[in-house]
Amino acid sequence: MKVLIIEDDPQAAAYLKKALGEAGHTADVAHDGDDGYAMASTGSYDTLIVDRMLPRRDGLSIVAQLRAEDDRTPVLILSALGEVDDRVTGLRAGGDDYLTKPYAFSELLARIEVLHRRSQNGDGETAYRVADLELDRLSRRVTRAGQDIVLQPREFRLLEYLMRNAGRVVTRTMLLEHVWDYHFDPQTNVIDVHVSRLRGKIEKGFDKPLLHTIRGAGYVMRE
Amino acid sequence: MSAPAPRRRLGAIFKTTAVRLSALYLLLFSVCAVLLVIYMTSLAAGFFLNETRMAIEQELRSLDRIYQRGGMRGLVVAIDRRARAPGAFVYLVADPTGRILAGNVRALEPGVIDHTGWTRRPFSYEKFRERGENGDQPQAVANIFRFENGMRVLVGRDLGEPERFRVVVRRALALALGLMALGGLLIWLFIGRRALKRIDAVSAASAGIVAGDLGRRLPVSSAGDEFDRLSASLNTMLARIETLNDGLREVSDSIAHDLKTPLTRLRNRAEEALRKDEGEAGYRDALEDMISEADQLISIFNAMLQISRVEAGYTRFTPEPVDLATVATELADLYEPLVEDAGGHLRNEVTGPLVAEGSRELIGQAVTNLIDNAIKYGLKGEGATVTLKGRADKAASRVELLVCDTGDGIPEADRERAVRRFERLEESRSAPGSGLGLSLVDAIMRQHGGELRLQDNEPGLCAVLSFPAAAP
C-alpha cells in the first residue's frame, strides 16, 4: 500500500514513515498543506494520513478539496483535537476515519489497513469465510464446519466486522466505534469481555483458534 | 496601612467622583438660580414699569380735564398744588427756554424735556425738599407734552419702589448662593473625606490580597450603601477565587500523586529490564508493559483535558434530542457481559421515551462512567445488581436516568466530596482509576444544564443524572 503522510512535525513524520515501511507499506511525506495537496492530487496514493493543523494550509481543507474533485482516496485524519465535535467536523469534511494524538501506531496501522481494504472492494460482499467459519449477511447465519452457531445480534455484528476485516488487526476502539457507535476510550475491558464471549461461541469444541489477540493492539481474525 | 500626607489627601479629594459631581451640581444650580432671579426681577420690573405708566396716564387724563376747564393757567395751578402733596409723582412745567416754572423737581438730567412722549429710559432727577437718600439719585419715568406756545409739561413717577425691590431680591440671591456654596463645600468635604477613607481601606485590603493573603476580605461597614454592596460582591468573587485556587492546588497535588505513581512504575519497569538483561523476549515484555503504562497515563491526561474542556464549555456540540431509554438499552447491551463477569447482574428498567437535549456521545460517556463505578465499588455480596432506572418529572419538566447499585454506598457526608475532581474516597484509593470519573460526569451534566446527584439506594448508591426535559 502506498501511503502519503501530510504532517508538519518532521520527527513524527519520519517515525510514521519508518514504521509503515516496517509494516510492508511505502510512504511519502509532505511537510506542509500546499505540498500535501499537490502530492495527494496526483492520485497515486492508496491512503492519506492528514494532520489537521498544518502550515500554509489546513488539513481539513485539503480533504474537502480532494472530495470536491471526486477523489475517493481513503483519508485518516490525525489530530490533537479529539472532542466528539472535532471528530464530527473532520468526518464531515470528508475524512474516512479520525485518530487523536497521541496515538498508538498499532491503532493507526489497523485503521488505515481497514480503510484501504474497504476502498478496494467495497462492502458488496454478502458472505465471509475464514477457514471453516462462514457468515452469511443475508440469512444472518453463522456456521462452522457445517454446524450452526447461534449468536445474539450484537455478537453477530461483532463477528461480521471482524470477518469483514479478516487478516487485519482490529483495535478495541474500532470495535466500540463500529459495533456500538460510541467514540470514547473504553476505560474498562468491556470490549475484551464481548470478544471472549464471542470466541467461546465460535471456538468451543473446535480445535483451531480463529480469533487471535494481538497484545497491545487488538484482535485479528485469521486461520 | 500607610496614611497619605494631608496635603495630598486634600488634593485627592478633588479627584473623587463624588466631589466632582457635587462641584458640577453646585455650579449648575448656581447658574440656574441666577438666571431664574434675573428672569423674575426683569419680569417684575416690567410689571412695575407698566403699573407706573398706567398711573401716569391716569394722572395725565385728570390733568387734561383740568386743562380743558381752566386752560393753561388752571393747569399750572393744579400742578403746583399736586406737586406739594407727598407722593411718588413727579411734576414739572417749563417754559420754552427750559426754565422750570412749577412742579416738585429742582433739577433733572439735561435733555430729558427736549423730547415729547414717554421717556425712553429712567432718568435721574432731584426733588424739592427731599434730599437724595443715601446719596442715591432718584430715578423716574415720565411723559412729556409740548404745548403750541412751547410750554412743556412733564408728569412722571418715581421708580424708588421697584428699584428697592430689585436690590432686596439681589441681596437675597447673593445670600442664598453664599449659603449654598458653604453647604456644598461642607458636604463636599464630608463626602470626599469619607469616600476617600473607605477607598483607602479597600485599597489597603486589596494590596494585602495581591500580596498573597487570599483569605483577606474587603471591609464592609454597617451602612449598607453602594460601597458596602460593591465590597460584598467583590468579597463573593474573592471567595470564589479562593475556592478555585484551593481546588487548583488540590488538583496539582493530586496530579502529582496520581501521575507520579504510573510514571514511577514505568521507570521502574525500564530499569528492571535493563538490570536483568532478560534477552529479547524479556525486553519485549518490558516494552509492552511500558506501553500499557503509557496508555494509562495518556488516558488520565485525556480525561483531565476532557473535563476542563467540558467545564469551560469548549465542547460545543450541537444539541439534538437524545432518548435516554435508547442510551440505556445500548449501554446495558454493552455492559451486561462485563457486569456478569464481575459477578453481578445488570437490569435495565428504563422505559422510554425520556427525551433530553444534548449529545448522545457525552451522555453515553457519563452513563458508562457511572456503570464502571458501580462495577468497581457497588458489586459486593450475593445477588449484587446494577440497575438502570428512568423517570420523568413532568411537573419539574425533568427527565432522569439513574444508575443504582446494591453495594456499600457512600455516606451522605462524603457524597459531595466524591464528585470533586480527583477526589477518591479513602477506601477506593487502592482501586485502579484516576478518580476523574464522577467529576467528568458532573462536568458533562453541567454542560447539559442538568446535574449529578448521589442518593441512597438502601442499600447501595444511586447516581442520578437529571436533565431538563427537551421541549416537545
Image: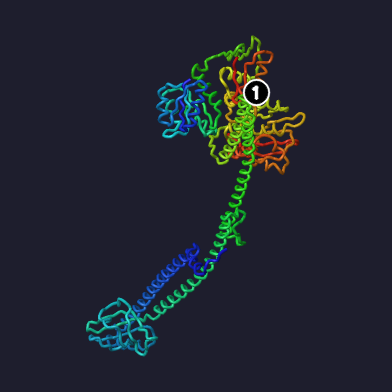
* Residue B283 vs residue A211, the one in the foreground: B283
Residue B5 visible within the image: yes
Please, what secondary structure does the residue beneath circle 1 have? helix
In the rendered image, the quadrant that contains the N terminus of chain B is: bottom right
Observer-nearest residue: B165 or B358? B358
* Quadrant housing residue B96: bottom left
Q: Is residue B394 visible to us here?
A: no
Answer left or right for B122 relative to A92. Answer: left
Q: Which residue is mark 1?
A: A194
Question: Tag 1: Cα neighbours inside 10 Å, few (<14), some, or many (≥20)?
Answer: some
Q: Which quadrant would residue B112 be assigned to in this image?
A: bottom left
- Chain letter behind tag 1: A
Q: Is residue B162 left or right of residue B432?
A: left
Q: Give the number of marks.
A: 1
Q: Residue most toward the right?
A: B382
x, y percent for residue B69: 30, 84
